[in-house]
Amino acid sequence: MTHLHLFTKYLREQKRYSERTVAIYTQAITSFFRFAGAEEEKACANMPPSMVRAYMAKMMEEEFSPRTVQLHLSAISSFYRFLSRQGLSSSNPATGLPRPKASKPLPDFYAQSALNHLLDSPIDSSYSMQFQAHVVIHTLYATGIRRAELTGLKVSDVDFLRKLMRVRGKGNKTREVPLTDALVRDLRLFMEGRKSQVDEQELHVDAPLFVTTKGNKLPLSYVNKMVHAVLDGAQGIPGRKTPHRLRHSLATHLLHNGADVFSIKEVLGHSSLAATQIYTHSDFKTLQKVHKQFHPRSE
């Protein structure tokens, strides 16, 4: 087993990173090896910091975003840190290297009135892919869960009695997210309709909550297409139509309506408060706009 295989095994089994994250780290490290022009074993044993600096410089010359350069540097640093702990490398060539500063764009979100109009519009609630798409949109916005968290939901994860949803997030951590009365109604209708259409064995507690036309778990790309198709024809929803923008929208609307940042952190499943505080900047933009519009000394 190669050093890289050992590292990816460590990421999956001990760090519990998602397959997408493991693939990104693998691609970054493999790309670095190609740039260094060295076999893996040789690159692991003796890699000077100057080679990592040259790799970063090349990425920036090719106009990779600072965030992408940071990600590659993090992957390389994590890889050599792992090797050092295993006694497979005497040093980490990425240690102490300056990281390019990446700007943090403010979260992009939809207007609350537009989403309310969309979700309150009459729709045929009999079981169909169209109604499922409506419930998926409603779930993403009402709970703020991630796209991958949505596709991982099981039938048993919805607790109608307590009005909550059990969600498995990053690092396989489980959290409970409250459900609104409106979402509970939609989920009940969806589940009742689904029960009438499929074999009872197909709807066991471990079955996926949302499915393809063949009854399989939704692929991530399927969710993207579903969200885009529904939002594309909706009134008052310009710009990108993505699941993550619905998550941004919930966080922003909760903050605008008076929720504290600590509660929003728990709902979103952020591991640190810093990840949630970006929404406070969005709220400050709103405050600036109101201040400028209504201040008696504003020009």
Image (cartoon, rainbow, N blue to C red):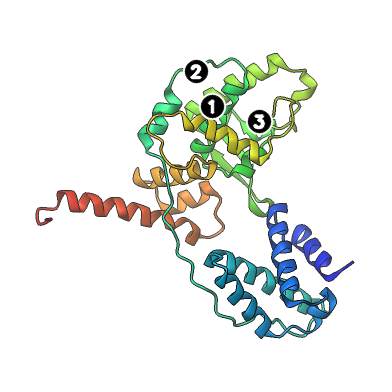
In the image, taking residue 39 as reference, residue 179 lies left or right, namely left
Residue type beneath disc 2: Ile
Which sits in the foreground, 289 or 257? 289
Residue 165 seen in the figure:
no
The image shows residue 24 at horizontal and vertical percentages of 68, 59
The image shows residue 81 at horizontal and vertical percentages of 72, 76
Height in image: 276 above or below 82? above
**Which residue lies most toward the right here?**
1
Q: Quadrant of residue 11?
A: bottom right
Within-10-Å neighbours for mark 2: few <14, some 14–19, many 20+: few
The mark found on residue 134 in the picture is: 1
Height in image: 124 above or below 42? above
In the image, what residue occupies the spot 53% across and 35% down?
228
Q: In which quarter of the image is residue 225?
A: top right
Residue type beneath disc 1: His
Secondary structure at numbered mark 1: helix
Whole-Å distance between the Cαs marked 1 and 2? 8 Å
Tell whether label 3 touches label 2 (CB within 8 Å): no
**Which residue lies most toward the left here?**
296
Whole-Å distance between the Cαs marked 1 and 3? 11 Å
Q: Mark 2 points at which residue?
A: 123
Secondary structure at numbered mark 2: loop
Tell whether label 2 touches label 1 (CB within 8 Å): yes
The image shows residue 210 at horizontal and vertical percentages of 66, 30
Tag 3 or tag 2, which sits nearer the N-term? 2
